[in-house]
Amino acid sequence: MNLKRLLIAGLCLGYALQSSAQEMDIKGKLFIIGGGSRPASMVDRIVKESGIDKGGYGIVLPMSSSEPDSSAYYATNQFYKLGVNNVYGLNFVKDEVLTVSKLDSIRNAKLIYISGGDQNKFMDIVQGTEIEVLIHEAYENGSLIAGTSAGAAVMSEMMITGTEMKHPKYNATYRHLESENIETKTGLGLITTIIVDQHFVYRSRYNRLLTAIIEYPELTGVGIDESTAILVSGKTVEVVGESQVVVFKNPDTSKTTFNDKIGAHGIILNIYLPGETFKID
């Protein structure tokens, strides 16, 4: 068992070290949803992009939720309402003995949909396991990986946890622009050059994402509003849904400080509407 864990850890490390090269060869796409309701047109786009309307199947991974059975039910039901009945819930628990049949269900899925909830909970279950390895494998081989809310946050390599280090009482949005305040952890790393924030316009999360790109200027900050998604295909990103996607860049790696307050100069802001596209590194 120890040898098996070492092999899995080695595979996960390999993904991190070779991420840039892998992104050049990936056949799959990402469908990253900013939370809120999913209009039927968005769900239909997921179906079409994944190809499950023509064959194969999709799975819902509900491990972000404190009520995974309910989460899987509601996630699959959005597909059933469109007459798509080949999407199934597949739950895992921490340190579960993984069966071949459940692992094959991930490996062969044309759609992997990660539900909302708590991104930290999801990563606590999958990080360093064969589940994580097989999500990467499916993505590289052509599957569509979709996720909403917490399921959006886990997509990037650097993941916003939602915690303010200096103000631990939870708020939906940061009320400060301060250094060493944002907590991040390692996500799935399906995309390595951006950091994702969700419910963005509705919950006014500008301070949080600005803090992220000032502290980590090598990353592009992508804030996705509710009922809105980005479809990532290679380096091209399309906005899908009903609202906006806000993109911050810090090309000059600018950061100034006054006591614990942070500032920056030359920040680039773009706001994209449904149907528009932009490029990422």
Image (spheres, helix red, strand yellow):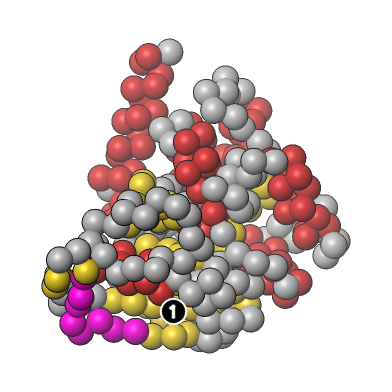
Work out whether residue 143 can be spotted: no
The range drawn in magenta is 262-269
- The x and y percentages for residue 186 are 36, 46
Question: Residue at 34% across / 68% down in the picture?
Answer: 176
Residue linked to disc 1: 246
Q: Is residue 217 left or right of residue 56?
A: left
Work out whether residue 46 can be spotted: yes
Whether 226 is drawn above or below 17: the answer is: below
Binning the other alpha carbons within 10 Å of mark 1 as few (below 14), some (14 to 19) or many (20 upward) gives some
Q: Is residue 104 left or right of residue 212?
A: right
Name which residue type carries label 1: Val
Whether 109 is drawn above or below 167: the answer is: above
| Residue 263 sits inside the magenta stretch | yes
| Residue 131 sits inside the magenta stretch | no
Question: Residue at 53% across / 86% down in the picture?
Answer: 273
Q: Quadrant of residue 66?
A: top right
Whether 131 is drawn above or below 30: the answer is: above
Q: Which type of secondary structure does the marked residue at label 1 adopt?
A: strand
- The x and y percentages for residue 27 are 47, 58
- The x and y percentages for residue 210 are 32, 72
Question: Residue at 47% across / 44% down in the picture?
Answer: 120
